[in-house]
Amino acid sequence: MALIEARKLTKIYSQGESVFGAKPRGGNEVRAVDDVSLDIHAGETLGLVGESGSGKSTLGRLILRLIEPTSGSVRFEGRDLLAARGGEMRRLRRDMQIIFQDPFASLDPRFRVEEIIAEPLVIHGSHGDQSASGIRLRVRELLGAVGLDESILRRFPHEFSGGQRQRIGIARALALHPKFIVADEPVSALDVSVGAQIVNLLAQLQRDFGLTYLFISHSMPVVRYLSTRIAVMHRGKIVEVGTAEQITERPAHAYTRSLLEATPQLAL
Amino acid sequence: MSTTAISFRRTARHNPLAATGVVLVILFIIFALFAPWIAPQDPAGINLSARLNTPSHAHWFGTDELGRDILSRIIYGARISMLVGSSIVITSLALGLIIGSIAGYYGGGIDRFVNVILMNAFLSFPGILLAIAFVAFRGPGIFNLVLALSLGGWVGYARLVRGQVLAAREREFVEAARALGANDLRIIVRHILPNIIQPVIVQAAIGMAGAILAEATMSFLGLGVPPPTASWGTMLNDGRAHLFDAPHLVLFPALAVMLAVLSFNFIGDALRDYLDPRSRIEAGL
């Protein structure tokens, strides 16, 4: 059984809704995600590639139920996510986390690093020891895991570079020992060298903690480097899924080929 | 403490109006808090042999038609103005924060009801008219006065908060909190409100000026604090009959209202400039 089973996921955004909630006749619809079915197996990294606006991020958020789908279903370890109610859903969130594209926007500017990383622990009061000292200990562990120094605990996000902020975001995502992480273009806002460090960190964390990734990116080289399997998305649909080798060496779909041809041959 | 003094001096140089506002507000607050020790005479002490005296050494601001010392009454009046003004702002702000956050955060049908129907309904009445009707119905008194003026006051805050929450809830760190499993209350209170509070504080400072003016208006109409408690609005009303033979009866309370209102407006304007990074650079701060 796959860790994640997404079936016929569809998200339609309708535009031009009036003040009183009436839908305009024949109004514009955007099918951000269109009838997507996808399995993600435990321990693998599924790379999700596609151009900007192809619906990659929306799909990632639908799988985490950060956005409600228009139709379709998502099962996490066989449990129907869309049937989970408020409190139940919040508990399920411990097992699935997200790392954001923009490390400048994803950290609350008014929280100290300590509070940011401790927040999931405070919310769930998990891991037996929920005392202040227990949380502090866990925050230190997490900082070590993502390669940050304890001296930054009392500082605010704006004092850090993009790479450091992304590490803070990763530490926060790891805090609850999740099984599954959606990495939504985690390196595209960073310098190439910093991005490479983050990619290596993600790979190492996967080995250390047995994580499963959905790695979203528009960069074929990065996805090829990290992924076990690759799914190619185009205009809200998955056009091709296969092993990383299959997709990069023997692409079957014309769009995949054009995506590969558009990639500069850079070693990563 | 010394850095506060330095930054205050710098503010005073760049924005003398704001500094004047701060000094005056502090003065009014001191008046309000320590009125019994500051006021030279009993504000309600009637002395019919000294009616309508012009300002003199014994009575700096003169006396009113019952021979009461106007300076003392103005000092005591600061109590009512500050107390009622801040109560109105706090009540309106609390209502505005709660209603505005709910409308902005949940959106959809709730937002449509609050924003289109409820807020517009309240906005379509002049606030002071609503307050007059309310006090006429419930009777005068400080509590009813605050309630009456907050009834129309919350809408402005709610609209501001709604708009700000609407924008803030789309920010990524809010989504991050949701992904972590935070409930709505935690997201609103810990993440959204602290990030939108600055413009709300500016509005509250300016709202304080409006509230003081509204209190004076209500008291002037006899719908405020019952006599003999000194209120600037009541004093204006009492002095009305002697506008031409003893203008100081009207002059001093009018000056007090004007200075209080101006001070809070200056502070509000300065806060807005200070909190807006663009004008902050222009001001050289």
Image (tube, helix red, strand yellow):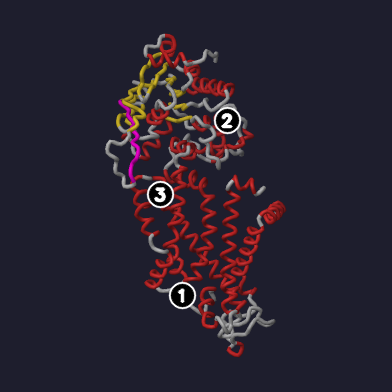
Taking the image as drawn, is residue B2 in sight? yes
What count of labels does the image hold? 3
Asked whether A117 falls inside the magenta stretch, the response is no
Task: Residue type at mark 3: give it.
Answer: Ile
In terms of depth relative to the viewer, which is nearer, B26 or A93? B26
In terms of depth relative to the viewer, which is nearer, B156 or B165? B156
Q: Secondary structure at mark 3?
A: helix
Q: Residue at the spot x=69%, y=52% of the render?
A: B7
Asked whether A16 falls inside the magenta stretch, the response is yes
The magenta stretch is A8-18
Above or below A102: residue B76:
below
Q: Residue furthest bottom?
A: B49
Q: Main secondary structure of the magenta part?
A: strand
Q: Residue furthest top?
A: A250
In percent of width and height, residue B96 lies at 44, 55
Pointer 1 local density, CA inside 10 Å: few below 14, some 14–19, many at least 20: some
Q: Which residue is mark 1?
A: B221
- Protein chain holding label 2: A
Q: Which residue is mark 3?
A: B102
In percent of width and height, residue A160 lies at 61, 33
Q: Residue furthest front?
A: B244
Pointer 2 local density, CA inside 10 Å: few below 14, some 14–19, many at least 20: many
Task: Residue type at mark 2: give it.
Answer: Gly
Q: Which residue is mark 2?
A: A162
